[in-house]
Image (tube, helix red, strand yellow):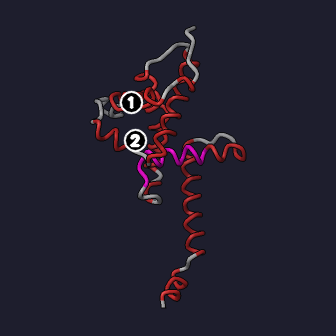
């Protein structure tokens, strides 16, 4: 078995190349044609602090995948596998559950990260959740957050302060 590098041996430039390679390997789920670079970029766009986290997730996936297969894999193989087996299943449920309607300023990449982060936060209490349960948990948390905000600043209170 080839020696598989630990995730910490990936440098930032290599991580950036992995994401660039990802953009060159993503295919339309139906036609299997390469998606235009602009479409891939739009899908993966996240707020700036999210890029580092996305790169870390791809790197960890690559490390685990190489351990599973017992061989070194190219960044292309890692990126394509992560996109197909990790990213797409989450974003498909995000779309089906219409999560973006609750968080309209978030990109698809932001929503992916939010589901991932929230799912991790629930592990100690609930164990590993499936993707639909993680997405529903994010929806519930966002609805609860909005209710708390409405209670904290009811519309009538805001008007009385303006007088």
| Part of the protein shown in magenta | 106-119
Where on the picture, by quarter, is residue 6?
Answer: top right
Quick one: 83 or 15, which is closer to the camera? 15
Give the vertical position of 104 relative to 18 (above or below).
Answer: below
- Would residue 7 appear left or right of 107 to someone viewing this image? right
Which secondary structure, mark 2?
Answer: helix
Give the vertical position of 75 relative to 71 (above or below).
Answer: below
Q: State the residue position of label 2.
A: 44
- Would residue 38 appear left or right of 95 to someone viewing this image? left
Where on the picture, by quarter, is residue 70?
Answer: top right
**What residue is shown at x 44% (from left), y 46% (from top)?**
48
Q: Residue furthest toward the top?
A: 1
Of labels 1 and 2, earlier in sequence is 1
**What residue is shown at x 56% (from left), y 18% (from top)?**
5
**What residue is shown at x 53% (from left), y 48% (from top)?**
114
- Which secondary structure is most common in the magenta stretch? helix
**Callout 1–callout 2 Cβ contact below 8 Å:** yes
Whether the magenta-drawn stretch holds residue 118 is answered as yes
**Residue 65 makes an appearance in the image:** yes
CA gap, disc 1 and disc 2: 10 Å
Q: Position of residue 78 (x, y in %)?
A: 46, 24
**What residue is shown at x 40% (from left), y 41% (from top)?**
44
Where on the picture, by quarter, is residue 24?
Answer: top left
Q: State the residue position of label 1.
A: 22
Whether the magenta-drawn stretch holds residue 38 is answered as no
Quick one: 104 or 159, which is closer to the camera? 159
Q: Position of residue 106 (x, y in %)?
A: 43, 53
Q: Quadrant of the N terminus?
A: top right
């Amino acid at each position: 078995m080839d020696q598989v590098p630990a995730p910490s041996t990936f440098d930032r430039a290599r991580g950036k190349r992995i994401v660039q390679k990802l953009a060159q390997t993503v295919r339309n789920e139906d036609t299997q044609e390469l998606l235009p670079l602009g479409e891939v970029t739009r899908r993966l766009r996240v707020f700036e602090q999210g890029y580092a986290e996305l790169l870390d997730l791809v790197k960890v996936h690559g490390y685990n995948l190489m351990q599973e297969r017992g061989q070194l894999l190219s960044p292309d193989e890692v990126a394509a596998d992560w996109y197909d087996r990790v990213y797409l299943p989450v974003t498909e449920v995000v779309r089906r559950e219409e999560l973006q309607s609750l968080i309209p300023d978030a990109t698809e990449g932001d929503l992916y990260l939010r589901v991932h982060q929230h799912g991790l936060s629930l592990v100690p209490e609930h164990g590993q959740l499936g993707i639909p349960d993680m997405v529903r948990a994010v929806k519930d948390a966002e609805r609860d957050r909005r209710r708390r905000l409405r209670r904290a600043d009811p519309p009538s209170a805001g008007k009385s302060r303006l007088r």
